[in-house]
Amino acid sequence: MRALFVVLKPLCFLALLGYCPSATIRPKEGWQVYSSAQDADGRCICTVVAPEQNLCSRDAKSRQLRQLLEKIQNMSQSIEVLNLRTQRDFQYVMKMESQMKGLRSKFRQIESNRRTLLTKNFQELKGKMNELQPLIPVLEQYKTDATLISQFKEEIRNLSLVLTAIQEEIGAYDYEELQQRVLSLEGRLRNCMNKLTCGKLMKITGPITVKTSGTRFGAWMTDPQASPKNNKVWYMDSYTNNKIVREYKSVSDFVAGVESRTYNLPFHWAGTNHVVYNGSLYYNKYQSNIIVRYSFESGRVMTQRALESAGFHNVYPYTWGGFSDIDLMADELGLWAIYATNQNAGNIVISQLDPLTIQVLNSWNTEYSKRNAGESFMICGTLYITNSHLTGAKVYYSYSTKTSTYEYMDIPIHNQYFHMSMLDYNARDRALYGWNNGHQVLFNVTLFHIIKTDDES
Ligand SMILES: *[C@@H]1O[C@H](CO)[C@@H](O)[C@H](O)[C@H]1NC(C)=O
Ligand SMILES: *[C@@H]1O[C@H](CO)[C@@H](O)[C@H](O)[C@H]1NC(C)=O
Ligand SMILES: *[C@@H]1O[C@H](CO)[C@@H](O)[C@H](O)[C@H]1NC(C)=O
Ligand SMILES: *[C@@H]1O[C@H](CO)[C@@H](O)[C@H](O)[C@H]1NC(C)=O
């Protein structure tokens, strides 16, 4: 009997069992992959049972095996991407940690000199340092998580080697069932990875200036739901009295000014807070709280719906005005509207929207005044609010829709051209798109992931 175990400790536990005819499990045709069980620690367990060798027809389905292998290779490529991203964050965390440790030892040195202990500045700094102390175990946890990802990576590679070995040894067999199960395993791995890519905002870097064009106020974006190959850019200059959307096939076409299409919308838009999501443009119709869904493919308005109670037409705009009352955005979890109502005393309300019907699925009331917000963007179900559209702006407040709790924060954002009229997160690019005083800019975000070993999918 041949037994091969591949253990995926961080996320999934995979066991590969070579099957021998005398064992009690009798797979009738081909392979069986059991992937639903959970062990005592809540990890998912996948068990693969190989078929009896004499059931295998040597000449059949080797193509399917190749596809299966390719799938696993593709999975490992995705993990590679994840790993790269994590490494980037990891370096940031390591740097922060060494800075904190350096600071700590400096404090110890100074503390041994009694005279400086009395100065007020020193006491303040020391207080700040003490506030940072709890971060150290968090950083430790992060290092552990990064190690787990690289283990995960290695184990996927091992699994692929194991399958190759089996292919060489046995040849070919009936794969339909196995393929099904691998597909579901793949789906679950993707879920795991989505969970890994979600996290709390730690840092914003950039901007990179992609292009300088248009008026001081406008919006530009790509579709986070589009396939990685489709990188169309949409461009909507100005916040009022316009209804022309320009489309570019790629970012380089956008930079070169090579337009591929223009769309003449049936209604003017208000503000700069539109979003393109899954092939449709969602925007706020001028002088109303109506949200319009316009399909680029059909060139038609598919849905229109009023966002009940939402203030509009500069009743509750962001700090810069510009009819920016209703901000539409998308993140890993779907489509959102950010606005304010009289009922919530002009404070920001977060609503999750159904992308097809634009109906409100769920709402959360924050206590942050919309008129005091510079901009806001959503990452992984958490809303981040900046305190200004001008120089010195920072991410100042966040609200998690998962826990319905808020938090004050202090994450600087470099407002290079002094006036920010649009700032939105794109989950596919993991970047913030901004319109910075007639410059189209991109920021990178660093997210902090806490990886749990329980599998919620
Ligand atoms: C693997 O990825 C490549 C490139 O993205 C794709 O063409 C191919 O169809 C994928 N294979 C499978 C089996 O999913
Ligand atoms: C992967 O395979 C190698 C060689 O068989 C082994 O040394 C290593 O421990 C395996 N890694 C994991 C994480 O299972
Ligand atoms: C995107 O649109 C397609 C059809 O156009 C639909 O099948 C799919 O469910 C949509 N995805 C999301 C996330 O809304
Ligand atoms: C974001 O990070 C990636 C990878 O490190 C880099 O290639 C890209 O230029 C960065 N973009 C911005 C806007 O800083």
Image (cartoon, grey):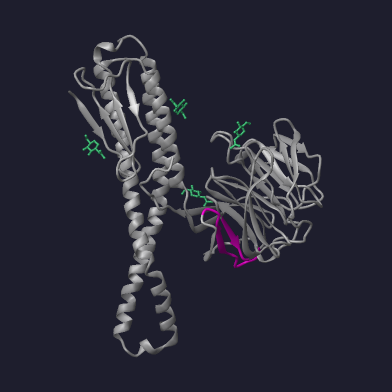
Asked whether residue 401 is drawn in magenta, I would say yes
Q: Is residue 335 above or below residue 66?
A: below
Nearest the eye: 172 or 353: 353
| Residue in the image at 70% along x and 37% along y | 259
- Residue 208 falls left or right of residue 126: right
| Residue in the image at 77% along x and 61% along y | 315
Q: Is residue 451 above or below residue 140?
A: above
State the image quarter where residue 435 is shown.
bottom right
Tell me the quarter of the image containing the C terminus: top left
- Residue 409 falls left or right of residue 256: left
Q: Please state the horizontal and vertical placement of residue 139, each as a whole percent of the image.
A: 36, 60
State the image quarter where residue 133 is shown.
bottom left
**Segment colored magenta:** 383-402
Q: Is residue 24 above or below residue 226?
A: above
Tell me the quarter of the image containing the N terminus: top left
Q: Please state the horizontal and vertical placement of residue 273, each as a whole percent of the image.
A: 69, 51
Q: Is residue 126 above or below residue 36?
A: below
Splitting the image into four quadrants, where does ligand 2 fall?
top left
| Residue in the image at 60% along x and 54% along y | 377
Q: Please state the horizontal and vertical placement of residue 129, each as a whole percent of the image.
A: 40, 74
Q: Please state the horizontal and vertical placement of residue 54, each as a whole percent of the image.
A: 25, 11
